[in-house]
Image: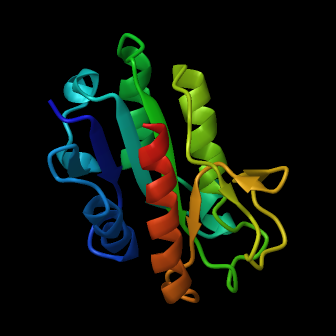
Amino acid sequence: MKKIVLLYWGKGGNVENAAHKVYEKFDSDTIDIFDLVSFNIDTIKDYSHMILGHSTVGAEDWMDAKADNEWNNFFRKLEKIEKPEITASSFCLGDQILYPDHFVDSLGVYKEEMDNAGIPIIGQWSTEGYRFSDSDGEENGMFYGLALDMDNEFKLSEERIEKWTKELKSKI
């Protein structure tokens, strides 16, 4: 049995690239990786920790987000499962330059969904060193998970992934 499952969406871009970078920081005997659509939610009970990888779309798109998007489908299915004995962490990609008022907002959405499911989150990350004006994904100087700006801070993203996964390993 694997200890960790890493789920990410969308496919074919920076989120998938970041997911594989996170995956590579773990021993392959302890972690499985799936794009969200390929994951069988019924197997969630086989894991003790899940890492969710996602992006924040521009604020104007959140208003138009479809109720049937892949993450919403996942969260609705998760609600129907008997509360799994699992913890969760999350990493989110955003753009501090184009969306400084909504940088990694979806970290807040994912925290709320985990709270609704009764799943504790770990892996909070300091906002120090980021340049943004507002985010629903942070509280009291801490993001609810790892914030990455692969477009504007690729090298910092590599360092942040390294440090964050090291911290996660010590808590899992």
Residue positioned most to the top? 82
The residue drawn where x is 44% and y is 57% is: 165
Residue 136 in view (yes/no): no
Residue 42 in view (yes/no): yes
Q: Quadrant of residue 129?
A: bottom right
Q: Position of residue 18 (x, y in %)?
A: 37, 70
Q: Quadrant of residue 14?
A: bottom left
Q: Quadrant of residue 153?
A: bottom right
The residue drawn where x is 63% and y is 35% is: 112
Q: Position of residue 35 (x, y in %)?
A: 25, 54
Residue positioned most to the front? 170
Looking at the image, how many numbered discs can be counted on the residues? 0
Q: Position of residue 72 (x, y in %)?
A: 45, 40
The residue drawn where x is 37% and y is 10% is: 82
Compared to residue 37, the image places residue 153 above or below, namely: below
The residue drawn where x is 52% and y is 22% is: 117
Residue 115 vs residue 24, the one in the foreground: 24
Residue 116 vs residue 73, the one in the foreground: 116
Q: Quadrant of the N terminus?
A: top left
Compared to residue 108, the image places residue 44 above or below, namely: above
Q: Position of residue 25 (x, y in %)?
A: 32, 62
Compared to residue 10, the image places residue 96 above or below, namely: below
Q: Quadrant of the C terminus?
A: top left
